[in-house]
Each structure stands twice: as C-alpha cells, then as structure tokens.
Image (tube, rainbow, N blue to C red):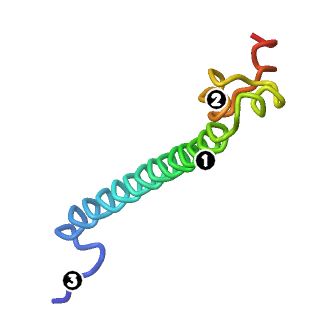
Amino acid sequence: MSATFTDSSRQPAAALLYRLAANLRATARRVLASATHVDAWLANRRAAAIARRDLNSMSDRELKDIGITRVDVERVAWGASNRDDLWM
C-alpha cells in the first residue's frame, strides 16, 4: 500500500512543515528589514563623519562664510541647518 497526500498520518506533519516555513519566511523578512535599517544607519554615520571631518578642517572664517560657527559643526554634520530653527 502506497502513501498518498491525503493519508491522515501525513497531514499533521505537512501542516507543521507549512507553519514552520511560514515562520521562517516571516523571520527572514524581519531580519532583512533590520539589516536594511542598520545599513541605512551606518550610511548616515559615515556621511556625518565625512561632513564633520570636512567642517572641522575649515577655519573659523570659512565656517562664518557659510553661515555656521564651530559649535554648529556637529548639528550641521547630521543634516540640520539654521533654517530648521525657523520652523520650530
């Protein structure tokens, strides 16, 4: 006698495997979303570090020419501008 898909002894195992596969897919999606989030966060950190390095290498006079002070370097490196203060 050969086993078939409708064999009642096989259905619980198939259902269990289906639930396991669904859980693995959901977990893979969450891992991918987390990895994407971390990648974006790291890209922002790298961009801020480059901007911070460039701004810190400028003289106070050069910073004044672009409208910021030495105190503003960190805030501007992360993307803020003096215009942001006008809208708060």
* Secondary structure of residue under mark 3: loop
Q: Amino acid at mark 3?
A: Ala
Residue 48 screen position, x and y as percent:
59, 41
* Residue furthest to the bottom: 1
Q: Which residue is mark 3?
A: 3
Residue 25 screen position, x and y as percent:
40, 59
Asked whether 43 or 19 is in front, the reply is 43
Residue 3 in the image: above or below residue 22 = below
Q: Amino acid at mark 1?
A: Ile
> What is the spatial separation of the Cα atoms under label 1 and label 3, in whole angstroms?
65 Å
Total marks in image: 3
Q: Which residue is mark 2?
A: 73
* Residue at 81% across, 12% down: 86
Between disc 1 and disc 3, the foreground one is: 1
Do the CB atoms of the residues marked 1 and 2 lie less than 8 Å apart?
no
Q: Amino acid at mark 2?
A: Val
Residue 29 screen position, x and y as percent:
45, 54
Asked whether 54 or 43 is in front, the reply is 54
> What is the spatial separation of the Cα atoms under label 1 and label 2, in whole angstroms?
12 Å
